[in-house]
């Protein structure tokens, strides 16, 4: 490939930080391809094409020899794995480290979450029973975030859409906040030519101002003693070490160390006394990433899962309540989950949400637009109760709730494209759960001579193999 032409001022800035070799790696190196497996779905590395090596700082992360056409792998659509840049998988390690001494359920906010890589990494690393709230400001990106979290299939998730200013009013609500803030994108120059084209000193300054505004908005919602994980995908000190120093000095935070293996090649912060972690492509297999953890002063107190909140409804449910839930929908829930979730009706939708976190869901609905919560079970249309795609992929679904039909890869791709699927002659009429490679894929309604494809239209494969 031709050598990338990087801005001269940018290269001078790297030289000032003694990062000349980094400039060469950005100009000449090729980005890696990597995936992170969904631990909750028991996916093995052998099921993903082209896997060649492990990502050392993520137990479920793997490098690939080359980039396959992920769109045409049904396992991706089943939430079996997430295509994620290897450096960004470090968040799973950080969350695991911060949780290792407690083991208690936490409430976590991923404040700038789209498309969902760091959110799903956190979900996999949090103690059982923890709730993750993922927020995104841009509507189109929020829709992608919602889709990716539904496919990851954790019932303990909420997706919100709005400005981080809304979280100022949710004081002391979260035990941990992930702030992967918008940045100047210097770490993406190998992957995205636009990152080179848009770079300027002015952009760096603008991003730093926006980052401070975001952190200032989020800080009141972090509990005393809670952790803030701050990260960017850029290299300059203004958005990284200097921002961490400002958080510590102006907000009274404490720098927190994370255990790392020296063989991983992660570099320390530059000209700072604080614990900072730099991923640079001249030192390791990954793109640019900066991470630092700070702790809010004060004594941390966990929330109690056994409060009366498990019997409450979230705000905004109107006149619908648990008494109006059809028995049919209740029967779709696996018995292991029946006591862990609250079922409720809102307009024409029936949902299940972790009972221990209903109080926080209510508070969120009072302050910000909630576009996904827990597991939407079904939509009511007249006398019909239509099972949802989130239910199909969810661990809540009882294995005996619906008849099943196993389909081939070609049939799975046809289904994911919105085409009709031919079912075996002995398939019962009504709703049928399609399975590919032994895992749920989605619902169809068998009408006898034909079946209606219920896969969500916005998610369907548009391109051709």
Image (cartoon, helix red, strand yellow):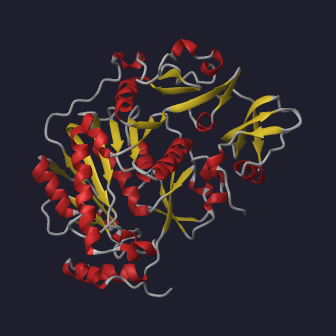
Say left or right for 446 vs 6.
right
Is residue 200 shown to the viewer in this render?
Answer: yes
Using the image as rendered, state which of residue 333 and residue 242 is in the foreground: 242
Whole-percent x and y of residue 395?
A: 56, 33
Write the residue at 30% across / 57% down: 231
Q: Residue furthest bottom?
A: 2
Quadrant, the C terminus = bottom right
Whole-percent x and y of residue 220?
A: 21, 39
Q: Quadrant of residue 396?
A: top right
Using the image as rendered, state which of residue 274 and residue 4 is in the foreground: 4
Image height of 20 relative to 156, above or below: below
Q: How many marks?
A: 0
Is residue 400 shown to the viewer in this render?
Answer: no
Say left or right for 21 vs 343.
left
Whole-percent x and y of residue 75?
A: 63, 51
Write the residue at 21% across / 53% down: 257
Using the image as rendered, state which of residue 353 and residue 103 is in the foreground: 353
Whole-percent x and y of residue 27?
A: 39, 82
């Amino acid at each position: 490939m031709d050598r990338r032409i990087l801005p001269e001022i940018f290269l001078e800035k790297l030289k000032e930080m003694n990062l000349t070799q980094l400039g060469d790696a950005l100009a000449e190196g090729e980005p890696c391809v990597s995936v992170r497996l969904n631990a909750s779905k028991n996916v093995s590395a052998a099921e993903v094409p082209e896997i060649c090596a492990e990502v050392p700082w993520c137990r479920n992360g793997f490098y690939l020899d080359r980039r396959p056409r992920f769109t045409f792998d049904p396992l991706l659509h089943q939430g079996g794995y997430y295509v994620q840049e290897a450096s960004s998988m470090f968040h799973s390690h950080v969350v695991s480290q911060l949780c290792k001494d407690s083991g208690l359920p936490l409430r976590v906010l991923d404040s700038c979450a789209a498309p969902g890589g760091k959110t799903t990494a956190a979900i996999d690393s949090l103690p059982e029973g923890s709730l993750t709230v993922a927020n995104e400001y841009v509507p189109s990106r929020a829709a992608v975030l919602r889709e990716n979290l539904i496919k990851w299939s954790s019932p303990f998730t909420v997706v919100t859409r709005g400005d981080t200013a809304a979280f100022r009013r949710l004081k002391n609500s979260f035990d941990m906040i992930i702030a992967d803030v918008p940045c100047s994108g210097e770490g993406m120059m190998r992957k995205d030519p636009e990152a080179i084209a848009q770079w300027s000193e002015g952009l760096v300054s603008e991003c730093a101002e926006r980052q401070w505004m975001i952190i200032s908005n989020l800080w009141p919602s972090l509990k005393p003693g809670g952790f803030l994980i701050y990260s960017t995908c850029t290299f300059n000190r203004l958005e990284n070490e200097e921002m961490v120093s400002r958080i510590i000095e102006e907000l009274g935070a404490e720098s927190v160390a994370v255990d790392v293996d020296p063989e991983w090649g992660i570099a320390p912060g530059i000209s700072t006394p604080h614990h900072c972690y730099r991923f640079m492509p001249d030192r390791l297999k990954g793109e640019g990433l900066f991470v630092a953890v700070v702790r809010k002063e004060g004594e941390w107190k966990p929330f109690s899962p056994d409060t009366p909140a498990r019997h409450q409804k979230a705000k905004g449910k109107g006149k619908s309540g648990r008494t109006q839930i059809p028995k049919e929908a209740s029967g779709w829930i696996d018995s292991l989950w029946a006591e862990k979730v609250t079922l409720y009706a809102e307009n024409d939708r029936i949902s299940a949400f972790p009972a221990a976190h209903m109080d926080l869901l209510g508070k969120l609905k009072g302050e910000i637009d909630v576009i996904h919560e827990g597991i939407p079970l079904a939509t009511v249309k007249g006398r019909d109760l239509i099972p949802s795609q989130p239910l199909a992929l969810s661990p809540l679904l009882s294995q005996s709730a619906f008849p099943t039909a196993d389909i081939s890869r070609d049939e799975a791709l046809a289904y994911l494209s919105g085409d009709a699927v031919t079912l075996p002659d002995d398939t019962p009429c009504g709703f049928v759960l399609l399975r590919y490679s032994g895992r749920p894929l989605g619902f169809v309604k068998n009408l006898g001579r034909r079946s209606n494809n219920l896969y969500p239209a916005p998610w369907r494969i548009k391109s051709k193999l």
